[in-house]
Image: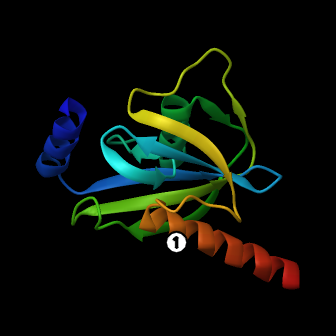
Amino acid sequence: MLSRLLHLFFILTRPMTLGVRGLLITPDKTVLLVRHSYHSGWHMPGGGVHRGEALEAALVREIQEEVAFNIIGKPKLHGIFFNNKVSKRDHVAVYICENFEEIPNQKSSWEISECQFFPLDSLPPELDGGTKARIFEYLEKQEAALSW
């Protein structure tokens, strides 16, 4: 309950924000999704960008903090999207991360109540709308690339 109140306070008191999310996809086509302790549904891991922080640096930091994974190499920018589900002033940069590794002996953040890999053809029904849209866009791009 306290984490929900803090999250609500943060949303109501902040100016326009920019967030980052990582679509972490394994070679066998599974995707890492998380449940946050302060709201329901499955989401891509990620979080807010600090003032003056580069987007990719924020992505690396957030993925390390939230789910204890290191992104290896340069992630691919999937797009920047308006996210009015959180507030009327949020934008989210989504990156495709296909090369990453678990950080040994590090635990996920307190914000994360559950973290799990799901096959792309068997996603959970409680999938967040934005996460679902980004995954389907990714799959469409993959199909288009294969048809060339």
The image quadrant of residue 123 is bottom right
Q: Is residue 118 left or right of residue 124?
A: right
Q: Where residue 98 sits in the image (x, y, percent)?
A: 73, 50
Q: Residue at x 51, y 52 (%)?
A: 44
Q: Where residue 47 sits in the image (x, y, percent)?
A: 41, 44
Q: Residue at x 77, y 82 (%)?
A: 144
Q: Nearer the viewer, residue 85 or 120?
A: 120
Please determine whether, in this image, residue 17 is positioned above or below residue 2.
below
Q: Residue at x 44, y 61 (%)?
A: 128
Badge 1: residue crowd in 10 Å (few <14, some 14–19, many ≥20)? few
Q: Is residue 60 left or right of residue 27?
A: left
**Secondary structure at numbered mark 1:** helix
Please determine whether, in this image, residue 142 is positioned above or below residue 1.
below
- Residue type for callout 1: Ala
Check disc 1 and report the residue beneath it: 133
Q: Where residue 8 sits in the image (x, y, percent)?
A: 17, 45
Q: Nearer the viewer, residue 124 or 107?
A: 124
Please determine whether, in this image, residue 120 is positioned above or below residue 21.
below
Please determine whether, in this image, residue 134 is positioned above or below residue 16.
below
